[in-house]
């Protein structure tokens, strides 16, 4: 039954039918009440519906389960989301302080630090290998027609100068003509050292593809800046805000000159309508990235507690 509910959920998300998506997740929760990832998804959908109170409630339940299972760093990271929605949330503030104290006490007692489930690391590695890293499409491997179309779309010099165009693995299964169509409708941008491509807390519904150069991903927790990742050619970012409707959860800052393709909402919706499997892949990518982010925040919180 859950398989049907998941299929209905993805269809509802594709159609932006958030009420139906909520009902699907509630049905799934009936048989899997202690799955924190489902509760996080439910919180995201509540945010889409503008129901902040229930969103916070779902995130609290997920954090409580993570805390009970011993994943206190993950729980603490999740409370960050709650405090972003409600900076004065007494429970989140109180429990965050308790968790930080618990981390410090464990360190003093020289207890072994919390270990992450092996599947978490495995998921993170798979994400980096298969979902995060783009596939390189060299122009020489494309037929003459596609090469001409790529050249025609080179409105900016940097596109014409690219030795290869990096395409997200999410789009790998699409026909070459469709890939070029997507590139034609995307928005190319160039940034310099220190420029913000996206800023934590801003609204946004675009997804980005880094074509050349490097960028760093940072977020803030309890007054501390945390570096989550260094992005390089072929990396995709910005999917969290697009899928959840939340404000940007992290900043992406250029490290030197970089070139970026921006895929805006109308284009993504067109792709998902014609190729539903791309949306499913994006959700898997999102779940892996959330896990990867929690892992990074957990590591940084351990350092803060030292």
Image (cartoon, rainbow, N blue to C red):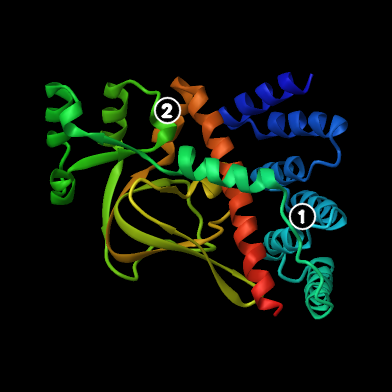
> Quick check: can you spot residue 186?
yes
Q: Position of residue 175 (x, y in %)?
A: 33, 20
From the viewer's side, name the closer residue of 39 and 109: 109
Q: Is residue 90 left or right of residue 218?
A: right
Cα separation between marks 2 and 1: 31 Å
> Quick check: can you spot residue 149?
no
**Quadrant of the rendering where the C terminus is positioned:** bottom right
The label on residue 17 is none
Q: Position of residue 134 (x, y in %)?
A: 38, 40
Q: Secondary structure at mark 2?
A: helix
The label on residue 56 is 1
* Residue visible at 78% across and 62% down in the picture: 72
**Quadrant of the rendering where the N terminus is positioned:** top right
- Count numbered badges in the picture: 2
Q: Residues within 10 Å of mark 1 (few under 14, many from 20)?
A: many
Q: Position of residue 297 (x, y in %)?
A: 63, 63
Residue 165 occupies quadrant:
top left
Q: Residues within 10 Å of mark 2 (few under 14, many from 20)?
A: some
* Residue visible at 61% across and 50% down in the picture: 290
Q: Is residue 7 above or below residue 257?
A: above
Q: Is residue 116 left or right of residue 135?
A: right
Q: Position of residue 168 (x, y in %)?
A: 39, 38
| Sequence-first tag of 2 and 1 | 1
> Which residue is the site of mark 2?
271
Q: Is residue 84 above or below residue 11?
A: below
* Residue visible at 70% across and 28% down in the picture: 20
Q: Is residue 210 left or right of residue 38?
A: left
From the viewer's side, name the closer residue of 239 and 140: 140
Residue 299 occupies quadrant:
bottom right
Q: Secondary structure at mark 1?
A: helix
Q: Are dots 2 and 1 in contact, CB under 8 Å?
A: no
């Amino acid at each position: 039954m859950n398989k049907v509910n998941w299929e209905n959920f993805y269809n509802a998300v594709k159609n932006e039918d958030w009420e139906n998506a909520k009902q699907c997740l509630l049905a799934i929760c009936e048989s899997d009440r202690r799955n924190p990832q489902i509760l996080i998804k439910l919180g995201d959908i509540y945010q889409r519906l503008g129901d902040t109170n229930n969103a916070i409630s779902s995130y609290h339940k997920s954090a409580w389960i993570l805390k009970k299972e011993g994943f206190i760093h993950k729980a603490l990271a999740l409370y960050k989301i709650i405090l972003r929605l409600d900076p004065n949330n007494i429970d989140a503030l109180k429990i965050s302080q308790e968790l930080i104290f618990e981390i410090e006490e464990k360190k003093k007692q020289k207890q072994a630090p919390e270990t992450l489930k092996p599947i978490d690391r495995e998921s993170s590695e798979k994400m980096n290998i298969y979902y995060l890293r783009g596939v390189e499409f060299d122009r020489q491997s494309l037929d003459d027609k596609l090469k001409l179309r790529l050249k025609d779309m080179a409105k900016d010099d940097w596109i014409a100068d690219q030795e290869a165009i990096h395409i997200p693995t999410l789009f790998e299964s699409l026909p070459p003509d469709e890939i070029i169509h997507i590139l034609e409708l995307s928005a190319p941008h160039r940034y310099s050292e220190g420029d913000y491509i996206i800023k934590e807390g801003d609204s946004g519904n675009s997804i980005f593809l880094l074509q050349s150069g490097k960028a760093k991903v940072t977020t803030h927790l309890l007054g501390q800046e945390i570096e989550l990742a260094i992005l390089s050619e072929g990396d995709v970012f910005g999917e969290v805000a697009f899928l959840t409707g939340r404000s940007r959860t992290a900043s992406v800052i250029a490290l030197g000159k970089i070139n970026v393709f921006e895929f805006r909402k109308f284009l993504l919706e067109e792709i998902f309508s014609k190729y539903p499997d791309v949306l499913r892949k994006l959700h898997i990518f999102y779940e892996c990235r959330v896990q990867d982010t929690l892992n990074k925040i957990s590591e940084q919180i351990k350092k803060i507690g030292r």
